[in-house]
Image (cartoon, rainbow, N blue to C red):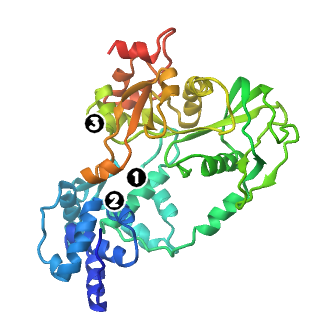
Amino acid sequence: MTRTIVCSDEQKEQLRQIACSTSAGIWRIKRAKIILGYLEGKSVDRLVLDVRVPPLSVIKFVNRFAEEEMTLFTTPDRNPTSREASVEQILTFLNHPPNQNSTEWETLTVNYVGISFSVRQIQIIRELIVSTTPFNKNIIAREICNKFGLYQPNGSIRLATVATILNRMDMDNVIFMPKKPKMSRNVGNSTRKSRFIVCNSEDETNYLTIENIRFSVVMNKKDSELWRNIILHYHYINTYRMFGPCMRYLVYGKVTIIQPTTTSTTENTHRTINEDSDKKCYWWEINQTSGEQLLAVLSFGAGAWQLSSRDEFIGWNNEQRVANLRYVVANTRFLILPWIKSPNLASRILGGIIRQIPKDWEDRYNYRPILLETFIEMERFTGTCYKAANWIHLGVTKVYSLYGIAQKQQVSSKAIYVYPMANNFRMLLCRNNSTKFHKVHCGLAPGMGPASAERRR
């Protein structure tokens, strides 16, 4: 529980000066940003994301500030971490830069999201921000990708990753990005909902037989909007934005036996969603050419940066993980539409997508996945369909490291499942030079499933 704090105008100005400083020390800078954010009405969770300080530390510092006020900034209560020390070293260097011929411009580096930046590169980024008028983070991120050669294996730039890095640098005062004005999000949400076309039905439809399951890659605006709106309305995690490499699918199937409902499926009647209606809102998406029914949606994205049980299962070291992590692909969303009922449908979909995603991923990104992973919220699901599809259960997550023991106990753990896409997946993922198997074929040998691969461990 945080206490109410009151600051005079003079104290607020002092806090702003510290928050914008490049010489006050990271511990002071972060704490000044915490107090200013709290005064602006930001939640503890929001401050954790903005400043990357554990929630208990945020609450503790706000409460201490309520008693000690600005004297709390006099003496640090801890030594800087190794990361904070490297950032402070960078800031000191840029405040008093040596001759441009000094080797320190290249040798002094700081790491963000697995990418090292030299002081000279940071200076170039600072100059880009100043010269880009009006300020546009995407333009700057694109320029950084091209200047520093930050490309994905398929040749596209790492735009989302660099945008995240810019936010982290701004958090540390390594760079300063102009603050964009706040915009209301209610208008955007209501617009998306109003564009979601649905049918209202009192009863659920039971499909007894589904044949010819087909996976359609989301490629155009229409399919993308359909995929987003289904996630927005029916998935318990109703966020749909994805960063980095990703694939999204619409899953269709031929329905041959249908249990009738109060609403005729043959009419395919579409109406705009009514937010005040108590009826269940169901989407009826039928391919007019083939007569296929939309069954489910899927998505795949980048694997988790660090995951102890997975990393132990693979057996790679930190250098190998950084070099080859892109070959680990995560199943980030899997939703069967709530009115679709068919025995073993989930495991059938998982079995089918495992056969299709290697080619689709290679077509888009010029390399094939070697290991798939996913996370199952144990309070909601048992993971039966993944077990039936021969995914391997590795354990449970230990929750994000910013959270202390008390917060970890409040956040539900998730079961970790993986699916090796090659018999020799460990050898491939533990190579130090990932370019040697850039286009490796990762098919399993006949009769060799992931369960057999696990027995050979």
Kindly indicate the quadrant of the structure image that contains residue 356: top right
Which mark, residue 148? Answer: 1
Q: Secondary structure at mark 3?
A: helix
Q: Does residue 306 appear to the left or right of 267 in the view shown?
A: left
Q: How busy is the neighbourhood of tag 2: few (under 14 within 10 Å), some, or many (20 plus)?
A: some
Q: Earlier in the sequence, mark 3 or mark 2?
A: 2
Rendering coords of residue 241 (x, y %): 54, 52
Q: CA distance from mark 2 to mark 1?
A: 8 Å
Quadrant in which the N terminus appears: bottom left
Q: Disc 1 marks which amino acid?
A: Phe
Kindly indicate the quadrant of the structure image that contains residue 121: bottom left
Kindly indicate the quadrant of the structure image that contains residue 30: bottom left
Is residue 343 in view from this perspective? yes
Q: Does residue 144 appear to the left or right of 345 in the view shown?
A: left
Is residue 98 in view from this perspective? no
Quadrant in which the C terminus appears: top left
Rendering coords of residue 33 (x, y %): 31, 73
Q: CA distance from mark 3 to mark 2?
A: 23 Å
Q: Earlier in the sequence, mark 2 or mark 1?
A: 2
Residue identifier under label 2 = 121
Q: What residue lies at 31% left-to-right and 42% top-to-bottom?
A: 398
Q: Disc 3 marks which amino acid?
A: Glu
Q: CA distance from mark 3 to mark 1?
A: 21 Å
Q: Disc 2 marks which amino acid?
A: Gln
Q: Nearer the viewer, residue 355 or 163?
A: 355
Residue 11 sits above or below residue 135 on the image: below
Q: How busy is the neighbourhood of tag 1: few (under 14 within 10 Å), some, or many (20 plus)?
A: few
Q: Earlier in the sequence, mark 3 or mark 1?
A: 1
Q: Mark 3, mark 2: which one is toward the viewer? A: 3
Residue identifier under label 3 = 319
